Image: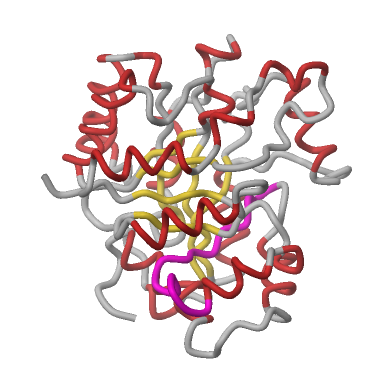
Amino acid sequence: MTPAATPAINVDELVAIDVHTHAEISADGHASLPPRLMEASAKYFGAHDHRQPTIDEMAAYYRERRMAAVVFTVDAEHATGHPPIANEEVAGACARHADVLIPFASLDPWRGRAAVRAARRLVEEHGVRGFKFHPSLQGFSPDDPMAYPLYEAIEELGVPALFHTGQTGIGAGVPGGGGIRLGHSNPMLVDGVAADFPELRIILAHPSFPWQDEALAVAHHKPNVHIDLSGWSPKYFPPQLVRYANSLIQDKVLFGSDYPVITPDRWLADFAKLEIKPEVRPKILKWNAARLLGLAKEG
């Protein structure tokens, strides 16, 4: 089955494609996370003046910078008890700004068959172009067979699955980490998913501290696995990540910011100072994502 129609994005005119941004507030003011977890995340990132832009505001922000952005929220209601922002709202808002925004959805795998049905509906009726998972926040191990029917549906739909990996600012400093278990976001747990679903295109989100070597191993070994560079300023990237991005996995590394907690302005300014080969830089900033998202065949 083919994905929904390609959004009206002119890749040639873009400076970059940001594959990792968050819809943190709904049109009626509902936040994507409970207040104590949102506050912990803002503190972790040093975002003292952090505000939650609407999706319409995000579109204006990225349009002004001649960038496109993947937008998603996280459905973690089973673990947190907090209702998510509706995927349909995210998709609808992105559709109003199809020249710059690309909608991903998030489904809690604990929803079982309901999640599978929702995945198909969101792609086929709402134009969703991928799915975001946050195993630590959602309280599941990526290789749990419980989630496999959902992966199977996503694989059949032909869209990517993006997994948070490594440390998270969500729950940081809260007693018990807010109940969030970091071990669920070890990228080696996604390796089994990549093996069992060889046609499922996977993105490992973030430099995967403290499992960076594991993430690089998985991305190098599994043809369908990519890495996005969101959530960290490039000046803090571990040297092995820069080395692999420049060589062995140069076609599988993607620009992501983690907006709004990290702005693309800050990320790109630091990335410009990084020792990345001239021929690799445009791949990371735009062309790898364009191919993965079906926006371009070559680059």
Q: Is residue 251 magenta?
A: yes
Give the residue at x 66% y 48%: 209
Look at the image and tell me in which quarter the N terminus lies: top left
Give the residue at x 41% y 45%: 103
Q: Is residue 85 magenta?
A: no
Residue 290 rendering spot, x and y as whole percentages? 36, 67
Q: Main secondary structure of the magenta part?
A: loop
- 172 sits to left or right of 163: right
Q: Write down the quadrant of residue 62 in the picture.
A: bottom right
Q: Nearer the viewer, residue 20 or 140?
A: 140
Question: Is residue 35 placed above or below 209 in the rendered structure?
Answer: above
Look at the image and tell me in which quarter the C terminus lies: bottom left
Residue 187 rendering spot, x and y as whole percentages? 50, 43
- 124 sits to left or right of 146: left
Q: Nearer the viewer, residue 115 or 148?
A: 148
Number of numbered markers: 0
- 269 sits to left or right of 68: right
Question: Is residue 121 placed above or below 44 in the rendered structure?
Answer: above
Give the residue at x 76% y 35%: 41
In the rendered image, the residue lying farthest to the left is 1
- 276 sits to left or right of 252: right
In the rendered image, the residue lying farthest to the right is 48
Give the residue at x 29% y 37%: 126
Question: Is residue 261 placed above or below 299 in the rendered structure?
Answer: above
State which region is magenta.
Answer: 246-260
Residue 293 rendering spot, x and y as whole percentages? 33, 59
Q: How was the colour assigned to the protein in this rendering? A: secondary structure
Question: Is residue 192 placed above or below 205 in the rendered structure?
Answer: above
Residue 59 rendering spot, x and y as whole percentages? 54, 54
